[in-house]
Amino acid sequence: MIKLIISVLIATFLWHWTNKTQIMEQVKLLTHQITQKEAITAKDIQPYKMVLTADQLGHFRGTVFMNGVPMPFMIDTGATLTTVPATMARKADLPLGRQYPVSTANGKAFQTATIISSLKIGYAELNDINGGINQTTDEVLLGMNTLNYFDIGISGNKMILSAKPSVRITSNFGSPTTPRKTKPITYTWKKSVICDENGEDCKTTYSE
């Protein structure tokens, strides 16, 4: 009888010890996972770096501040200049410059030149960036003249924008600033119309 009681006690002790050990291992694993997650999060929001996650269509989107006004943006490596929707440009008080022809998915169109006094992505702030104001887009298209200020890396569905040393880093992540008033940009453009001998086939060109 005593041997049976001792056997039961030993079995109970071993069960509790094994269960405790398993629980401790699970706690360690969970703690490790949490630590790793926190490390990744901290890495993603470093002042000089911003990480974007691709949407279902594979596009990289986020929020950019122009003259303190938040706007949705999409990365467009095929665009030379950063393009701003006309409605958002008005809210940001962007100056209006000359009009120039552009090719779009819907055919030929005209954009209006502008200068963005303050363009802020995360902690990085760029000043006096050339851009275009478009009547048909509904989000900002970040073109190469803006992206050239960053080193771009892609890993899986993540795009990492690392600000180059020349970029100004601010103290607040994406916080709006007071819009800067800028003078309108004025250009003088010359319109030329050249037609064939019959006056039927005409071509219009613009030059400064």
Image: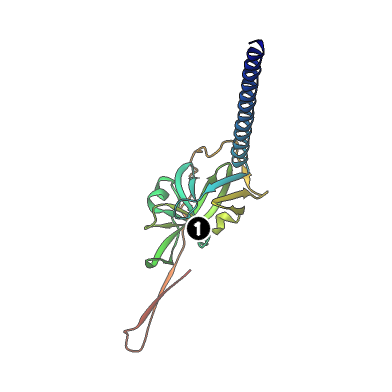
Residue 115 against residue 176 in the figure, above or below: below
Q: Position of residue 116 (x, y in %)?
A: 51, 51
Mark 1 burial class by Cα count in 10 Å: few <14, some 14-19, many 20+: some
Q: Is residue 186 left or right of residue 152?
A: left
Q: Position of residue 175 (x, y in %)?
A: 52, 37
Residue in view at x 57 percent, y 48 percent: 126
Tell me the SS state at disc 1: loop
Q: Position of residue 26 (x, y in %)?
A: 61, 30
Q: Position of residue 97 (x, y in %)?
A: 45, 58
Residue 85 against residue 204 in the figure, above or below: above
Q: Residue furthest bottom?
A: 197
Q: Is residue 115 left or right of residue 105?
A: right
Residue closest to the eye, 123 or 4: 4
Judging by the rendered image, the residue that carries numbered circle 1 is 76
| Quarter occupied by residue 44 | top right
Residue 76 against residue 102 in the figure, above or below: above
Residue closest to the eye, 198 or 59: 59
Q: Label 1 sits on what residue type? A: Asp
Residue 158 at least partly seen: yes
Residue 182 at least partly seen: no
